[in-house]
Image (spheres, grey):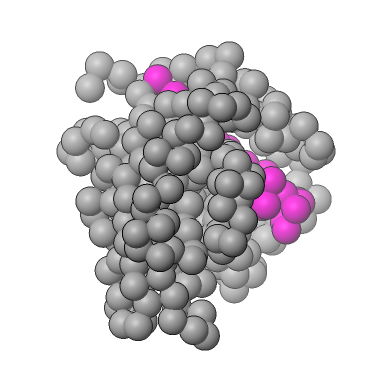
Protein backbone atom coordinates (compact mmCIF):
# COMPACT_ATOMS: atom_id res chain seq x y z
CA UNK A 1 0.00 0.00 0.00
CA UNK A 2 1.23 3.49 -0.85
CA UNK A 3 -1.08 6.47 -0.40
CA UNK A 4 1.29 8.99 -1.91
CA UNK A 5 -0.10 10.74 -4.99
CA UNK A 6 0.62 10.01 -8.62
CA UNK A 7 2.20 12.92 -10.45
CA UNK A 8 0.87 13.87 -13.89
CA UNK A 9 2.18 16.63 -16.10
CA UNK A 10 1.47 18.11 -19.50
CA UNK A 11 2.14 21.26 -21.45
CA UNK A 12 -1.39 22.42 -20.63
CA UNK A 13 -4.77 20.87 -20.04
CA UNK A 14 -4.53 17.90 -22.42
CA UNK A 15 -3.16 15.52 -19.80
CA UNK A 16 -6.36 15.97 -17.82
CA UNK A 17 -8.05 13.58 -20.25
CA UNK A 18 -6.33 10.62 -18.54
CA UNK A 19 -7.62 11.43 -15.07
CA UNK A 20 -11.26 10.29 -15.42
CA UNK A 21 -10.06 6.90 -16.72
CA UNK A 22 -7.68 6.60 -13.77
CA UNK A 23 -10.36 7.53 -11.24
CA UNK A 24 -12.75 4.99 -12.75
CA UNK A 25 -10.16 2.21 -12.66
CA UNK A 26 -8.35 3.18 -9.45
CA UNK A 27 -10.73 5.37 -7.43
CA UNK A 28 -8.53 5.50 -4.32
CA UNK A 29 -5.62 7.08 -6.13
CA UNK A 30 -4.98 10.79 -5.73
CA UNK A 31 -3.20 13.05 -8.19
CA UNK A 32 -0.86 15.98 -8.29
CA UNK A 33 -1.26 17.42 -11.77
CA UNK A 34 0.88 20.13 -13.30
CA UNK A 35 -0.24 21.92 -16.45
CA UNK A 36 2.32 24.30 -17.90
CA UNK A 37 -0.38 26.61 -19.18
CA UNK A 38 1.88 29.68 -19.21
CA UNK A 39 4.16 28.10 -21.81
CA UNK A 40 1.79 25.93 -23.83
CA UNK A 41 1.88 24.67 -26.55
CA UNK A 42 5.10 22.65 -26.49
CA UNK A 43 4.60 21.05 -29.90
CA UNK A 44 6.16 23.86 -31.91
CA UNK A 45 9.03 24.66 -29.52
CA UNK A 46 12.69 23.65 -29.79
CA UNK A 47 13.60 20.30 -28.24
CA UNK A 48 16.13 21.94 -25.91
CA UNK A 49 13.39 24.21 -24.55
CA UNK A 50 11.02 21.30 -24.01
CA UNK A 51 13.73 19.35 -22.18
CA UNK A 52 14.35 22.30 -19.86
CA UNK A 53 10.66 22.72 -19.06
CA UNK A 54 10.24 18.99 -18.46
CA UNK A 55 13.17 18.82 -16.04
CA UNK A 56 11.71 21.70 -14.05
CA UNK A 57 8.29 20.08 -13.74
CA UNK A 58 9.54 16.58 -12.97
CA UNK A 59 11.79 18.03 -10.25
CA UNK A 60 8.76 19.81 -8.80
CA UNK A 61 6.72 16.60 -8.71
CA UNK A 62 9.52 14.62 -7.08
CA UNK A 63 9.85 17.29 -4.39
CA UNK A 64 6.15 16.74 -3.72
CA UNK A 65 6.87 13.07 -2.96
CA UNK A 66 4.89 11.44 -5.77
CA UNK A 67 5.13 7.65 -6.06
CA UNK A 68 5.02 7.73 -9.87
CA UNK A 69 5.27 10.28 -12.67
CA UNK A 70 3.04 10.04 -15.73
CA UNK A 71 4.13 12.11 -18.70
CA UNK A 72 0.65 12.88 -20.02
CA UNK A 73 2.05 14.56 -23.10
CA UNK A 74 3.07 12.88 -26.35
CA UNK A 75 5.52 15.65 -27.21
CA UNK A 76 7.44 15.32 -23.94
CA UNK A 77 7.27 11.52 -24.01
CA UNK A 78 8.70 11.40 -27.53
CA UNK A 79 11.89 13.30 -26.64
CA UNK A 80 12.31 13.38 -22.84
CA UNK A 81 11.25 10.01 -21.40
CA UNK A 82 14.68 8.38 -21.22
CA UNK A 83 16.33 11.54 -19.90
CA UNK A 84 13.77 11.96 -17.11
CA UNK A 85 14.08 8.31 -16.11
CA UNK A 86 17.84 8.79 -15.71
CA UNK A 87 17.28 12.01 -13.77
CA UNK A 88 14.84 10.41 -11.30
CA UNK A 89 15.68 6.67 -11.13
CA UNK A 90 13.96 6.34 -7.75
CA UNK A 91 10.51 7.08 -9.25
CA UNK A 92 8.84 5.01 -11.99
CA UNK A 93 8.10 7.25 -14.96
CA UNK A 94 5.44 6.25 -17.49
CA UNK A 95 5.12 7.78 -20.94
CA UNK A 96 1.88 8.08 -22.87
CA UNK A 97 3.08 6.51 -26.14
CA UNK A 98 4.17 2.92 -25.43
CA UNK A 99 0.76 1.66 -24.20
CA UNK A 100 -0.79 2.74 -27.51
CA UNK A 101 2.05 1.13 -29.47
CA UNK A 102 1.52 -2.12 -27.56
CA UNK A 103 -2.21 -2.01 -28.34
CA UNK A 104 -1.63 -1.63 -32.07
CA UNK A 105 1.03 -4.35 -32.09
CA UNK A 106 -1.59 -6.74 -30.66
CA UNK A 107 -3.87 -6.34 -33.70
CA UNK A 108 -4.56 -9.59 -35.53
CA UNK A 109 -4.86 -8.12 -39.01
CA UNK A 110 -2.88 -5.77 -41.19
CA UNK A 111 -4.03 -2.22 -40.94
CA UNK A 112 -3.22 1.33 -42.03
CA UNK A 113 -2.61 3.44 -38.95
CA UNK A 114 -2.77 7.20 -38.97
CA UNK A 115 -1.09 9.10 -36.13
CA UNK A 116 -1.99 12.73 -35.55
CA UNK A 117 -0.02 14.88 -33.14
CA UNK A 118 2.14 17.95 -32.69
CA UNK A 119 5.02 18.81 -34.99
CA UNK A 120 7.58 17.55 -32.45
CA UNK A 121 5.78 14.24 -31.87
CA UNK A 122 5.40 13.58 -35.59
CA UNK A 123 8.98 14.56 -36.46
CA UNK A 124 10.29 12.22 -33.74
CA UNK A 125 8.57 9.27 -35.49
CA UNK A 126 8.24 7.61 -32.08
CA UNK A 127 4.98 5.88 -32.99
CA UNK A 128 6.26 4.71 -36.38
CA UNK A 129 9.48 3.34 -34.92
CA UNK A 130 7.71 1.64 -32.03
CA UNK A 131 5.10 -0.04 -34.19
CA UNK A 132 7.63 -0.91 -36.88
CA UNK A 133 9.81 -2.68 -34.34
CA UNK A 134 7.08 -5.23 -33.61
CA UNK A 135 4.88 -5.29 -36.72
CA UNK A 136 6.38 -4.86 -40.16
CA UNK A 137 3.02 -5.53 -41.78
CA UNK A 138 1.31 -2.48 -40.29
CA UNK A 139 1.66 0.73 -42.26
CA UNK A 140 1.95 3.91 -40.20
CA UNK A 141 1.34 7.42 -41.50
CA UNK A 142 1.88 10.46 -39.30
CA UNK A 143 0.50 13.98 -39.67
CA UNK A 144 1.08 17.10 -37.63
CA UNK A 145 -2.07 19.00 -36.67
CA UNK A 146 -0.71 22.11 -34.91
CA UNK A 147 -3.95 24.12 -34.83
CA UNK A 148 -5.85 21.61 -32.68
CA UNK A 149 -4.11 22.38 -29.37
CA UNK A 150 -4.60 26.17 -29.29
CA UNK A 151 -8.24 25.77 -30.36
CA UNK A 152 -8.89 23.20 -27.63
CA UNK A 153 -7.07 25.31 -25.04
CA UNK A 154 -9.41 28.17 -25.96
CA UNK A 155 -12.45 25.95 -25.58
CA UNK A 156 -13.22 25.97 -29.31
CA UNK A 157 -14.41 22.36 -29.48
CA UNK A 158 -18.10 21.85 -30.22
CA UNK A 159 -18.59 24.16 -33.15
CA UNK A 160 -18.15 24.64 -36.88
CA UNK A 161 -14.63 26.04 -36.56
CA UNK A 162 -13.41 22.76 -35.08
CA UNK A 163 -15.29 20.73 -37.70
CA UNK A 164 -13.62 22.70 -40.48
CA UNK A 165 -10.21 22.23 -38.85
CA UNK A 166 -10.77 18.48 -38.52
CA UNK A 167 -11.63 18.27 -42.22
CA UNK A 168 -8.65 20.42 -43.14
CA UNK A 169 -6.25 18.01 -41.49
CA UNK A 170 -7.97 14.65 -41.86
CA UNK A 171 -10.12 14.53 -45.01
CA UNK A 172 -7.33 14.04 -47.56
CA UNK A 173 -5.09 12.24 -45.05
CA UNK A 174 -7.63 9.51 -44.35
CA UNK A 175 -8.64 9.15 -48.01
CA UNK A 176 -5.19 9.22 -49.60
CA UNK A 177 -3.54 6.82 -47.13
CA UNK A 178 -6.63 4.62 -46.73
CA UNK A 179 -6.49 5.09 -42.94
CA UNK A 180 -8.68 2.72 -40.93
CA UNK A 181 -7.18 3.29 -37.47
CA UNK A 182 -6.41 6.72 -36.01
CA UNK A 183 -4.15 7.33 -33.02
CA UNK A 184 -4.90 10.48 -31.04
CA UNK A 185 -1.22 11.27 -30.60
CA UNK A 186 -1.76 14.26 -28.34
CA UNK A 187 -3.56 14.18 -25.00
CA UNK A 188 -5.63 17.18 -26.02
CA UNK A 189 -7.22 15.28 -28.89
CA UNK A 190 -9.59 13.04 -26.86
CA UNK A 191 -11.52 16.25 -26.23
CA UNK A 192 -12.43 16.29 -29.93
CA UNK A 193 -12.77 12.50 -30.33
CA UNK A 194 -16.55 12.70 -30.62
CA UNK A 195 -16.28 15.34 -33.35
CA UNK A 196 -13.83 13.17 -35.29
CA UNK A 197 -15.97 10.05 -34.86
CA UNK A 198 -19.09 11.87 -35.99
CA UNK A 199 -17.40 12.96 -39.22
CA UNK A 200 -15.51 9.68 -39.78
CA UNK A 201 -17.62 6.97 -38.10
CA UNK A 202 -15.75 4.04 -39.69
CA UNK A 203 -12.42 4.96 -38.07
CA UNK A 204 -11.12 2.86 -35.20
CA UNK A 205 -9.86 5.37 -32.62
CA UNK A 206 -6.86 4.64 -30.38
CA UNK A 207 -6.88 6.86 -27.28
CA UNK A 208 -3.52 6.74 -25.42
CA UNK A 209 -5.03 8.75 -22.55
CA UNK A 210 -7.16 5.73 -21.71
CA UNK A 211 -4.60 3.03 -22.47
CA UNK A 212 -1.90 4.51 -20.23
CA UNK A 213 -4.09 3.79 -17.18
CA UNK A 214 -3.61 0.05 -17.73
CA UNK A 215 0.15 0.54 -17.52
CA UNK A 216 -0.16 2.63 -14.37
CA UNK A 217 -2.27 -0.02 -12.67
CA UNK A 218 0.08 -2.83 -13.71
CA UNK A 219 3.14 -1.09 -12.27
CA UNK A 220 1.44 -0.17 -9.00
CA UNK A 221 0.06 -3.68 -8.50
CA UNK A 222 3.41 -5.34 -9.14
CA UNK A 223 5.15 -3.05 -6.65
CA UNK A 224 2.29 -3.24 -4.10
CA UNK A 225 1.83 0.53 -4.27
CA UNK A 226 -1.90 0.84 -4.83
CA UNK A 227 -3.56 3.40 -2.56
CA UNK A 228 -6.02 2.35 0.12
CA UNK A 229 -8.48 4.74 1.76
CA UNK A 230 -6.35 7.71 0.86
CA UNK A 231 -7.42 11.08 2.29
CA UNK A 232 -5.12 13.05 -0.01
CA UNK A 233 -7.02 15.61 -2.09
CA UNK A 234 -6.10 15.75 -5.77
CA UNK A 235 -4.30 19.01 -6.50
CA UNK A 236 -4.13 20.67 -9.92
CA UNK A 237 -1.29 23.12 -10.39
CA UNK A 238 -0.91 25.47 -13.31
CA UNK A 239 1.87 27.86 -14.24
CA UNK A 240 -0.93 30.19 -15.37
CA UNK A 241 -4.19 29.52 -13.55
CA UNK A 242 -6.31 30.75 -16.42
CA UNK A 243 -10.08 30.70 -16.72
CA UNK A 244 -9.74 28.19 -19.59
CA UNK A 245 -7.81 25.79 -17.37
CA UNK A 246 -10.37 25.96 -14.57
CA UNK A 247 -13.28 25.65 -17.00
CA UNK A 248 -11.77 22.59 -18.66
CA UNK A 249 -11.19 20.84 -15.34
CA UNK A 250 -14.81 21.52 -14.39
CA UNK A 251 -15.99 20.20 -17.77
CA UNK A 252 -13.93 16.99 -17.61
CA UNK A 253 -14.81 16.23 -14.00
CA UNK A 254 -18.40 17.45 -14.04
CA UNK A 255 -19.90 13.98 -13.49
CA UNK A 256 -17.23 12.52 -11.23
CA UNK A 257 -16.53 12.67 -7.51
CA UNK A 258 -13.06 14.10 -7.98
CA UNK A 259 -12.30 16.75 -5.36
CA UNK A 260 -10.34 19.51 -7.02
CA UNK A 261 -7.98 22.00 -5.41
CA UNK A 262 -6.46 24.62 -7.71
CA UNK A 263 -3.05 26.13 -7.11
CA UNK A 264 -0.92 28.46 -9.16
CA UNK A 265 2.79 27.79 -9.28
CA UNK A 266 5.36 30.00 -11.00
CA UNK A 267 8.11 28.29 -12.97
CA UNK A 268 10.66 30.32 -14.88
CA UNK A 269 8.55 31.34 -17.86
CA UNK A 270 11.26 33.51 -19.41
CA UNK A 271 12.68 30.66 -21.50
Residue 50 image offset from top left, x and y in percent: 27, 37
Residue 86 in sight in this render: no
14 in relation to 161, above or below:
below
Residue 147 image offset from top left, x and y in percent: 38, 31
Q: Which residue is at the front of the view, 131 or 66?
A: 131
Q: Is 63 a magenta residue?
A: no
Query: How many numbered tags mark residues here?
Result: 0
Asked if residue 18 lies left or right of residue 80, the reply is right
Q: Residue at x 25, y 16 (%)?
A: 270
Q: Quadrant of residue 269?
A: top left
Asked if residue 64 lies left or right of residue 76, the reply is right
Q: Is 33 a magenta residue?
A: yes
Residue 196 image offset from top left, x and y in percent: 56, 46
In what quadrant of the picture does the C terminus appear?
A: top left
Residue found at the far top of this picture:
243
Q: Quadrant of residue 53?
A: top left
Q: Which residue is at the front of the view, 242 or 64?
A: 242
Residue 1 image offset from top left, x and y in percent: 69, 61
Residue 16 in sight in this render: yes
Q: Residue at x 45, y 34 (%)?
A: 165
Q: Quadrant of residue 140?
A: bottom left
Q: Residue at x 48, y 52 (%)?
A: 184
Specify start and end residues of the magenta stretch as a single range. Answer: 19-38
216 in relation to 222, above or below:
above
Asked if residue 26 lies left or right of residue 83, the reply is right
Q: Which residue is at the front of the view, 108 or 258?
A: 108
Amino acid sequence: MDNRPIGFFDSGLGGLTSIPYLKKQLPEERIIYFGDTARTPYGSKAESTIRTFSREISDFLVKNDVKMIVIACNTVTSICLDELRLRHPQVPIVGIIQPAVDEICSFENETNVGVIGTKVTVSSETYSKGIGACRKDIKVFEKACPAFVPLIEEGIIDNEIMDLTIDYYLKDFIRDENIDTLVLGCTHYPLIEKRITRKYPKLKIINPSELVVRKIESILRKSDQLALNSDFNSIFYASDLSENFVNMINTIFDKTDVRVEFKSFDLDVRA
